[in-house]
Amino acid sequence: QYYFIYLPGSKKGYLLSAKKGVGEAKVRSSYQAQNPNNKITKVNLGWYHNRAVWEVTAKDSSDHYQYQLYEFKNGNLLG
């Protein structure tokens, strides 16, 4: 399985092997373990500082949006 990231501003695309990174399910699990009261609204693959990342968008108990990035390569939280 492969993931594709297209960056319209630079007109570049990146093809990533799923075997060389962590999957969406692992990122969801990591996020929920650290934020059990938040509800994930979406998870997207993106690009940040020249690397592939998982972008997690969630809502907290006050209905405020939360946004976190995880490295595609190893699933580590950025920031």
Image (cartoon, rainbow, N blue to C red):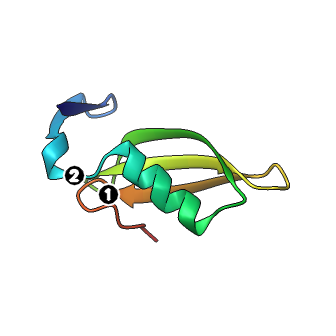
Between circles 2 and 1, the one closer to the viewer is 2
- Residue 30 sits above or below residue 54 on the image: below
- Residue drawn at 22 percent across, 52 percent down: 21
User: Contact, CB < 8 Å: mark 2 with mark 1?
Assistant: no
| Sequence-earlier tag: 2 or 1 | 2
What distance separates the C-alpha of mark 2 from that of mark 1?
Answer: 17 Å
Residue 47 relative to residue 38: left or right:
left
**Residue labelled with disc 1:** 49
- Residue 16 sits above or below residue 27 on the image: above
**Residue labelled with disc 2:** 21
Dot 1 amino acid type: His
Q: Which element is circle 2 on?
A: loop
User: Quadrant of the rendered structure where residue 13 is?
Assistant: top left
- Residue drawn at 14 percent across, 50 percent down: 20
- Residue drawn at 46 percent across, 48 percent down: 55
Which image quadrant: the N terminus? top left
Classify mark 1: residues with Cα within 10 Å, few (<14), some (14-19) or many (20+). Answer: few
The tag on residue 6 is none
Q: Percent position (x, y) of residue 7?
A: 30, 33
User: Quadrant of the rendered structure where residue 74 is?
Assistant: bottom left
Q: Which element is circle 1 on?
A: loop
Q: Percent position (x, y) of residue 11?
A: 24, 28
Q: Residue furthest right?
A: 62
